[in-house]
Amino acid sequence: MPTETFEFQVEARQLLQMMIHSIYSNKDVFLRELVSNASDALDKLRLEALRDDSLDADVSDLHIDIETDRQTRTLTVRDNGIGMSHDEVVQLIGTIANSGTAKFLRELKEAEGTTAAEGLIGQFGVGFYSSFMVADEVTLLTRRAGESQGTRWTSSGEGTYTIETVDSAPQGTAVTLRLKPEDVDDQLHDYVSPWKIREIVKRYSDFITWPVRMVPEAADGAEGADDAPREPETLNSMKALWARSRDEVTDDEYHELYKHISHDWSAPLETIRLQAEGTFEYQALLFIPSHAPQDLFMQGYQRGVQLYVKRVFIMDDCEALMPPYLRFVKGVVDAQDLSLNVSREILQQDRQIQLMHRRLAKKVLSTVKDMMSAEPERYATFWREFGRVLKEGLLSDFENREAILGVSSFATTHDKDEPTTLRQYVERMKDGQEHIFYLTGESRQAIENSPHMEAFRAKGVEVLLLTDPVDEVWVEAEPAFDGKQLRSVAKGEVDFGTEEEKKEAATEREGRQQEYAGLLGWMTERLSGTVKEVRLSSRLTVSPACIVSDTHDVTPALQNMYRAMGQ
Ligand code: ADP
Ligand code: MG
């Protein structure tokens, strides 16, 4: 079979360059990435075998083996999982499909040399390519389960890779790294030492549900070594973290599980545990990431919560478990009483799953609420990263609307930098103020310049400044918080002050209305067809006039939005 040479896609090449020049200070994680991929491949094979009886694959002894050879300076991670076809190798290893990557690379280029660059890098996982941090050549030999021919892929990470078809290859994938000399000679980075391998696997991959084994190096020169092949040593405990009690598991262990399932390289912001007993038993271990992924708002965004059934991985991104506005939550849900064959369609209709979904959503919201009061700074990070997504829930999840409002923050006239919670707003409300006032607009500045704001400014009444597009929509329902309705300052009559003051203002308005009846009548006539009514207002202090909508009219911004959507 001829060997074909291919070029890496541009983004892939850029990323590889960064790997070769070791942008990460912790190189050990390359092994975590390889073991993680091997584990995914075993999960996939088990599932496919379960769904397809005719699949010609051996699933009797699934495992991950690590072999080292000091003489040749090589380290191999081998799995007997699903493997890859020729085309899959080209597609999955030669290109970067993740749409967020290009954006990440652009941002990184802009931030080059700054501390922001460090932070960016730390967040971004590079998976398989991390091999090139420690290797000057990587070979991948793979055969997809059910296929007869295998594929060998080789590259030094410098722009091109070669692919050749091989007649006999074991099922699954073996990745062999030829380590850079400095990554063998240096005691700290001696990646052919059993001691080092053991340590890394224990630290990063202990929870992997498949045996990760170390195959002893062929005992060259070892005096009196018996000829019998030595047994591989299993390095990980394989214990599902979610099934262990809280005090048995360290934060670091939780974090490593998070990194495995989320493909994120930084630690989560929050870990959430939930154990449900009774007729429908399940365990959930959920995580709130510390930063929003690049593609959170793109179509087809994936990788939320994984579903396990009795410790067996069933599916990624189980949308039946989490509402879309909590799609940033990662984690594992392990249910006792579901069939291993359960499908997405069945899950969507299952009553128990619907109950679980509700309970998980409430649990996430209550965790955020606790965070808000106990750790304001951490909450601030949460809101900065995920507030925009969370607010989508105000439109879709009526049951939890007040809870979502309760954990939301808004820009406010009270403080030009710090956002406020509704609780804080309510505490500052003036005597006689019944509503929570807001105004929507394109930017803080646009809102502050609005004539609608004048009276509020003059009276010192706080107004929330809502600038996210989604704000235009959810406020339409005029939700209430703590019994106080949210009211736009641009709609209908606004009155605040004590009963006394309100009455006074009304009488005064009436008197003046009569006084100006002639002018108002004339204006109404002139503007008929354009406005419903012309009336005197106490809401202006500087501007001569402003346009107000009725309480139940759609706002101008929303009208624009509908028009843009062709309605
Ligand atoms: P990620 O794991 O985040 O998808 P990686 O760079 O680690 O990204 O891997 C890219 C893809 O290559 C994987 O999604 C998978 O499809 C494929 N792959 C990598 N390693 C293996 C393996 N050992 N067996 C089968 N497929 C693999
Ligand atoms: Mg990976």
Image: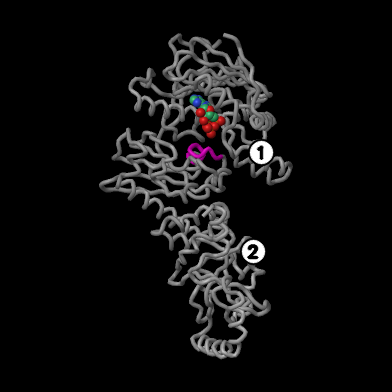
Instruction: Write the start and end of the magenta stretch as one range.
Output: 257-264
SS at badge 1 = helix
Near mark 1 (Cα within 10 A), the count class, few <14, some 14-19 or many ≥20, is some
Q: Is mark 2 within 8 Å of ligand 1?
A: no
Residue at image x 62%, y 74%? 546
Magenta-drawn stretch, dominant element (helix, strand or loop):
helix
Toward the viewer: 436 or 482?
436
The quarter of the picture where residue 126 lies is top right
Question: What is the three-letter code of the residue carrying label 1?
Answer: Leu
Tell me the residue that label 2 is attached to.
Answer: 444
Q: Nearer the viewer, residue 247 or 386?
A: 386
Q: Residue furthest right?
A: 113
The amino acid sitting under disc 2 is Arg
Real-space Cα separation, disc 2 to disc 1, in angstroms: 30 Å
- Asked if residue 535 is among those painted magenta in the image, a careful observer would answer no
The residue sitting at 55% across, 16% down in the picture is 152
Instruction: Report whether 449 appears left or right of 278.
Output: right
Residue in the picture at 58% in, 70% down: 530
Q: Is residue 253 visible?
A: no
Residue 25 visible:
yes
In this rendering, the label closer to the viewer, 2 or 1: 2
The quadrant of the picture occupied by the N terminus is top right
- Residue highlighted by disc 1: 105
